[in-house]
Image (cartoon, rainbow, N blue to C red):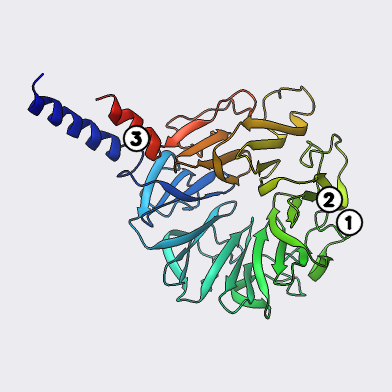
Amino acid sequence: MNANSHLLKRCLVAALLFQALAGGGQTVAKIAAGGYHSLILKSDGSLWAMGHNVAGQLGDAAKELAVNQPEQILTGGVAAIAAGSQHSLFIKSDGSLWGMGNNFAGQLGDGTLNVVTAPEQILPGGVTATAAGDLHSLLLKSDGSLWGMGANNRGQLGAGRDKFLDRPERLVGLGVTAIAAGFCHSLFLKSDGSLWAMGDNSYGELGDGTLTNASQPEVIIAGGVVAIAAGGYQSFFLKQDGSLWGMGRNDLGQMGDGTTKSVDRPEQIIPGDITAVAAGGFQTLFLKSDGSLWVMGQYGNGPSRDGVDQGSRRPEQIVPGGVAAIAAGTLHGLFIKNDGSLWAVGEDRYGQRGDEVFKTDYDFGKIEPKLVVPGQSIVAKALARY
């Protein structure tokens, strides 16, 4: 092969690699895992989606009811994403809030209860963060105020009344720095490091020592909290010392404390070295400072590795290192590696793993993490062979 032919082949291979699942070679910057769908934000600001689309949560009415590989929804300008049970939210770089999908309880905040199958602007600006639950949504504005819309039947909006809101309504005036939405409960952090909770408390997920729902925000921890995560019926938070704490449903080992007894007050799970936590419907993911990824709780509907309640009562490592970010859906997980590559584990019935297959065998312990979007090092290694 002469030099020109070799160069041409190399260029062709490069073009194919960059046009494959990597979507033009851009790496993955942020991820969000919903009930049975997933959202991807790439480094160029483009929005991608995969998985269940029964309510238009992927943002494209022309798509099938289930999509098993990442498909581009927007070409750029997206800054943050959130995925609920059947709806999706995203923030553009101008601070505007957009949504699509199920709107049964007004969770899209557009003043209607109509399903939305294409991205729709909800607020024109000023939004810095958003979170999506089952039938409710939270958003944080640049002034530190907390807003919400959607269902409030369990008090998840903390609005003090049993009524859904079909428009964003201000819930907390100032000082909020982080938000998280579970199935029917909500968590938020204030600038003083205090943890607050509201909504459903059937399993003690509010951590106030009772099983009584809270229709208004109540303080759970007075200070020292740096990160929060809300799952189906469980809650987690990280303290300044890197310790991981949890409360709520534990019948499948979601707390990782070795039992299946639900916890109605904050319980320390790991004493330190934790950098991130993501709570799903029935499982919990967390990262350690060495980049290792761990899981506890239900892996899926198949038999688990330990054969106990289809879940693990203790944390189990599934990736030894190199993980930078995580997200947890009902029964699937996503993670980004340091090179910007996207990987997926868990359930794939609706294509939410995005690896071009639909699988019903989704035991975390049996399915190896699947590469969804290549990262820089993967592309470089592939090119080096030519």
Q: Tell me if label 1 and label 2 are in contact, CB under 8 Å.
A: yes
Residue at the image position 88 percent from the left and 52 percent from the top = 264
Q: Which residue ends up furthest to the top in the rendered image?
A: 1
Residue 336 in the figure: left or right of residue 64:
right
Mark nearest the camera among 3 and 1 is 3
**Mark 3 or mark 1: whose residue is earlier in sequence:** 1
Looking at the image, is 259 positioned above or below residue 182? above
Q: Which mark is residue 203?
A: 2
Q: Tell me if label 3 and label 1 are in contact, CB under 8 Å.
A: no
- Does residue 7 appear anywhere in the picture? yes
For the N terminus, give its image quadrant. top left
Q: Residues within 10 Å of mark 2 (few under 14, many from 20)?
A: many
- The residue that mark 3 highlights is 379
Q: Which mark is residue 211?
A: 1
Q: Amino acid at mark 3?
A: Val
Q: Amino acid at mark 1?
A: Leu
Q: Residues within 10 Å of mark 3 (few under 14, many from 20)?
A: some
Q: Amino acid at mark 2?
A: Tyr
Q: Residues within 10 Å of mark 1 (few under 14, many from 20)?
A: some
Looking at the image, is 82 positioned above or below residue 306? below
